Amino acid sequence: MAITSANQLELLQTAEAVAREKMIDPALVVEAMEESLARAAKSRYGAEMDIRVSIDRKTGRATFTRVRTVVEDEELENYQAEMTVETAKQYLDDPQIGDTFVEEVPPVEMGRIAAQSAKQVILQKVREAERDRQYEEFKDRAGTIINGIVKREEYGNVIVDIGAGEAVLRRNEKIGRESYRPNDRIRVYIKDVRREVRGPQIFLSRTDPQFMAELFKMEVPEIYEGVIEIKAVARDPGSRAKIGVISYDSSIDPVGACVGMRGSRVQAVVNELQGEKIDIIPWNEDMPTFLVNALQPAEVTKVVLDEEAERIEVVVPEEQLSLAIGRRGQNVRLASQLTGLDIDIMTEEEESARRQAEFEERTKLFVDTLDLDEFFAQLLVSEGFTTLEEVAYVEPDELTVIDGVDDDTAEELQARARDYIEEQNRKALDAARALGVEESLIEFEGLNPQMIEALAGDGIKTLEDFATCADWELAGGWTTVDGERHKDDGVLEPFGVDLEEAQAMVMTARIQLGWVDPDDLAGADDAEAGSTEIAEENEA
């Protein structure tokens, strides 16, 4: 592709040939040629000169021009490319700062080195244009399946020819111990497309859960048409998978549609995934019900959901425990991924033992604090009383329904409970004051003495300290690190304070301190309510 002044008429033909081969705009190739010719001319006339080249898009004739710009006297640095207003008067009638004077210069004859340099410039520009085209083509195809041909393997990563470029299937994105040879056909999921210095990087996957979802979309027309939706997918690539589906047409069974006649549809997906066993589960908005389905084939006796902690307790018969957990924990792990909840599995015996331990703990609480005998304390626990506050402040008739409890006994029970609570409150306040808690925090509505003592133990001793707390610092929360969820304990979490309550208390403290204007908050709430109403109207 060496270019000389003798064959300028062939420039357009060369540009079109290169553009056609690389599938890019011919104008980009011509611009690259102009830049390469300008660079060669600068090496002939001088690097400080502003030499520009324009190639006629019809004739291919290259015009070489020298450009000089008019600048302030004190800004004049490059005499070859700049000139003062006074000097410019020789060439221009009424020169102004920023005006340019353009004059044509003779074209240069390219030597071998200059031609080689020009070729490198053109190739570089062509490569950049090719990368831009490739990125634009694939950036919107992330999340779809594509067929490719294996070119080679590098350090366990498979380089795949996808027609308009190359993509990489990393070692950890292959199913099990898959191995490929050059020219093997491969079906892959485009996981990510990123623009990088060395060109667009297209990352493929065969282990991504969405790869399975897209395969089902290809095999099941109802999913493609939107009649059936895949709500969740969890995979142990190459071994087992679970997929939750829902049908928006009551006449269509989502599980049956995905399985197909004699299992033909699901078998096609299984074959593509190297024999990966797939459990197809009907989706249910009620998470405990969905989890019971997700843990099949194990039978579940009882489910207890803790929505705030995103945890769920599952009770199964002893003989079903190993089935529910699965080999190496696979079944419960996939069910956890499918529901997005942490799952605790226990047998009926373990759950019974835990309930017995809670019963004995609450019984001991009432025996120690209310000076009751064990039988009477057990009666209270059996009737559902769990705390002293419940005994102290319930309506008396909720106590008199217990066998052997009359009005006088109920009154005595409540008096003892209140006396004990008041004594504990007094001790907690004394301990908090000894730690240096200010009255502004003690008098803050919503905090009881035990809470104030806990805050003081954590270094929160003033209303200002309290107002700077984050809601999760008070109520606790969960943090995901490297894909694993970790519990963050809150100072007030033992007292049953949730995130919403913590946020409300902190905001109240900030308002009392004058840090936040309540009118601003009201305006923000009104705006949010208004936007919600508009959204609901639009949906309607």
Image (cartoon, rainbow, N blue to C red):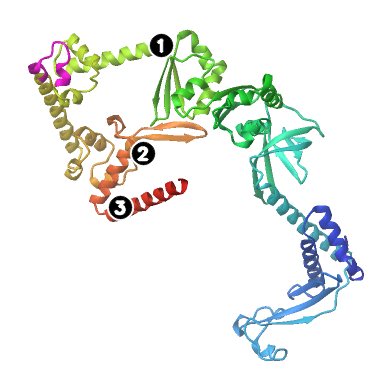
Instruction: Judge whether 268 appears above or below 77 on screen.
Output: above
Q: Residue furthest front?
A: 251
* Numbered disc 2: secondary structure: helix
Foreground mark, 1 or 3? 3
Q: Report how far apart the C-alphas of labels 1 and 3 lie in the structure.
A: 50 Å
Foreground mark, 2 or 1? 1
Instruction: Judge whether 536 appears above or below 370 on screen.
Output: below
* Numbered disc 3: secondary structure: helix
In front here: 160 or 3? 160
The type of residue carrying mark 3 is Ala
Residue 348, numbered circle:
1
Q: Which residue is mark 2?
A: 472
Q: Residue furthest right?
A: 6
Query: Disc count in the image?
Result: 3
Are the two marked residues, 1 and 3, in contact with CB atoms closer than 8 angstroms?
no
Q: Report how far apart the C-alphas of labels 2 and 1 lie in the structure.
A: 34 Å
* Numbered disc 1: secondary structure: helix
- Residue 129 appears in which quarter of the rendering? bottom right
Q: Residue 128: percent from the left, percent from the top? A: 73, 55
Q: Residue at x 66, y 50 (%)?
A: 196
The region drawn magenta spans: 397-410
Q: Earlier in the sequence, mark 2 or mark 1?
A: 1
Q: Residue at x 49, y 28 (%)?
A: 339
Instruction: Judge whether 238 appears above or below 318 on screen.
Output: below
In front here: 277 or 7? 277
The type of residue carrying mark 2 is Trp
Judge whether residue 517 can be spotted in this image.
no
Q: Which residue is mark 3?
A: 522
Screen quadrant of the C terminus: top left
Screen quadrant of the N terminus: bottom right
